[in-house]
Image (cartoon, helix red, strand yellow):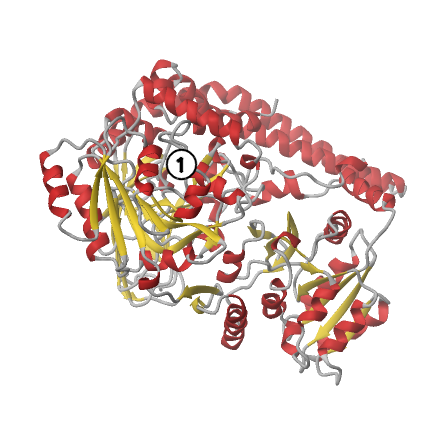
Amino acid sequence: MNIRYLMTRYKLFRLGYLRNVSHWLIKKGLWLIHILITYLLPYLIYPEINQYRLLMDIIDEKNRYIEHLQSNDNRVEIKKHVSAYNKYLFLFRIKFLLQIILFPIAAISFIIRKIWRFFVLKVHHLDYSDESLEAGTIPGHDSRAGEIHYTLKPVNKGARIPSGLVYLRYRIASSKSDNPLLYIDQGSGFTEDYSIPLPASCGVVKEYLIELPSYTRSLKLSIGCLDGVIELSDIVLLETNLLVAAYKHAKQNNLKLVRALYEIFIREFPWTRRPYRYNQNYTTWIRNFDALQNQDVRSIQNHIAALTESISITIILCCFEGKPELLKRSIHSIQQQYYNNWILLLVSEENLAIETLSLISESDRKDSRIRVISSLAPVQPRRIIKTITDDSDCIAYLEQGDVLPSHALYMIAIHFLSHQDTEILYADHDYLDDAGTRLNPYFKPDWNYDLFLSCNYLEGILAFKPGLVIDVFDEGNKSEILHPALFIYKMITRVSEDAIYHLPFILCHKAMVDSSSPEVPESFINAMADAIANHLKNSTPNASARIEDPKNRIFRISRVLDSKQHPVSLVIPTRNHYTLLSNCIRGILERTDYSNIELIIIDNDSDDSITLEYLDLIQADPRVSVVKYPGTFNYSAINNFAVSHCSHEYIALINNDIAVISETWLSEMMGHIIRKEVGIVGAKLLYGNDTIQHAGVIIGLGGVAGHAFRYFPRNSPGVNNRLLMTQQLSCVTGACLLTKKSIFTMVNGLDDTNLKIAFNDVDYCLKVRDLGYKIIWTPYAELYHLESASRSYDLNEENIERWQSEYNYMKTKWQDKLKNDPAYNPNLTIAGEDFTLANKPRVSKPWVHYE
């Protein structure tokens, strides 16, 4: 059985069940097993496993090539490659034998180092140099635009950078800076896969626990988007161990030692995550799951041959001024398609270079399937489209530089044949650098209207029905032919959301934009803003679009509303905890700009005199009422009881440990909930240390559900900027949830029988989504959340059994829904909350039955 598979199953087991500390770590006696699997196997087994797998790949490749040479009777080349192959195999066997001999020594050395670390903790002072400055210049300068990189090295020459758990202490003073990233080099250079996000310093000394892999050669600190003077100082690595780190963590956060030990043990922070240990990099993922093998190619060809009908695909490739080689590789990739029922239409921009025009003319002459149309031609764009759609069943759009994998058109054709209700089809994409290396995959969610308005994520290959194209073009509008990003906003208003499909496969490789490439013209960004505004004018008259991030083409959609017309009831359950409660209520009443509110506090047997006195005093405010709910704590029952006392249609469920950050938080959420198609709105919640606690809930993580991007820094953009954009999600947390009373009543509220404490918010969201309502998460409503501070942790036997029962109930009730979250992607992991690659994609390839 595959070791990686076993490790993945173990991680799922750990994520799903080891949340209950005393039950599983102490009573089930898994502590030593966990140490063995977590620490020893990756260090001692993974290198051999990886090398063995790489050897098998090389052997297969060599054998295929030798078979090819034999078929061509090329004896000289056969002898040359067989000799090189035998030499490589001999050297590998020698190396593998040496590793087996040295294995006991390495194991003993590893154990000694770990034991030594419990008694001797060193302090490593780091020196730093700005790579953008001349040697000898002291940091404390006017920073350049973009990112600035500091190389970190030990002050003592010859000293090694420590590995394992260490505290990184640093201070960054700047008039403006983004959160820093720490890059790790283990000998193969710096990459995003080997990076750790860190919180901003804001001019004070910060200290965070991180984990560095063995044999770290160098470190680089990258600070982005600087504007002004930057000073970097006090950079120190302090060695630590599990016990010392747990004691310090418990003291700083007022936790029980066993809980702190558990959190440190499973690395529950982004700066202690271990992408270099568990997460495969994209190159490995491509080799394992995306690259077509000979059998795949034969199966695809068999499937195409077995088709009883086919469709004609017209590809519109927009040609712009730029590198002609980009256009050449786009055309070449289309000509290499296994599915050959296509026509390529080259739409050329005015004033193209002679070299580009020659390439277009040559392509037209050599391949009869390639046609050329100039945007300067005296033919109306509508008539152009009409002529090419008469003989087409499907139209696909590409941009210059886009490269299609050889099975892309096959995948599109098969989908349109099997899903004839499809009007619009899009797929995942990644990027190609100048060397042809694939980078930065964009694994997209299924159709997500609000995310699309925030940023057009339908880049890459985009396919649609011909009739849809004819309907949306304005007479004489040349720009819309060249830029599908402009007319797509018209297109989506003409189709049902059920007719927009997503293929979770990489079917387009876009050209990487380097620093020398021109930025997106401001006129194009403004044209996109106008297109969104025109779309909103027809669909949502009270909404407007604002450019939030021109570089990433992110827009913020705002909706104007009158609070007098939309009163809202806020529900806060509590028991004691005067400090938390008073801070929460003060933020709502004094630091929230939405004034038309009713605040209902549900008192669940508070017996603290200060809290009781405060509850009596606060009722003097006409907006506040206190309702008693005696008895055992049941979160679902308390909120159901509270909603029955609400006077208004709009209801907000608020935890008593919520603290207001932005005064516009409620206005932002109300702007979405008033939409008739929206049933629930969630907010961006932060821990007290400015890391993310809640940015939406992804179903399926850890078996049931998990929080997206938990423990990421507050200002982190997230993967593909998901943390910066309003979007639809499957679920949001009940700690700050805005909904409608009519919907709440329709689904019988929260399940107070089967889900008294955990997962009731997830269950409620799934019930609302089943009714057809949308669930919105917005990053523009920010609040602090000291998670479950008033309830502490479930460590007694009764609570453990209750949690297990609720977990099993969710797994049984929603087993079909938990298999795939439409706001997520089956190529991403369900063993973590950071949107990294899955150990194995949860997709089915259409050609597997034609082997």
Side of 89 relative to 589 (left or right): right
Vertical arrangement, residue 647 with respect to residue 843, above or below? below
- Pick the quarter of the image with the C terminus: top right
Q: Is residue 848 left or right of residue 796?
A: right
Between 793 and 836, the one nearer to me in the picture: 793
Q: Position of residue 698 (x, y in %)?
A: 47, 41
Front in this rendered view, residue 676 or 142:
676
- What SS does tag 1 mark? loop
Relative height, residue 365 to residue 122 (above, below): below
Q: Position of residue 466 (x, y in %)?
A: 74, 64
Q: Is residue 219 left or right of residue 125?
A: right
Residue 104 vs 792, above or below: the answer is above
Is residue 39 in view from this perspective? no
**Kind of residue at badge 1:** Leu
Q: Residue at x 49, y 21 (%)?
A: 103
The residue under label 1 is: 750
- Measured from the top left, where is residue 110 in percent x and y? 40, 24
Residue 567 figure quarter = bottom left
In this rendering, would 184 be left or right of 292?
A: left
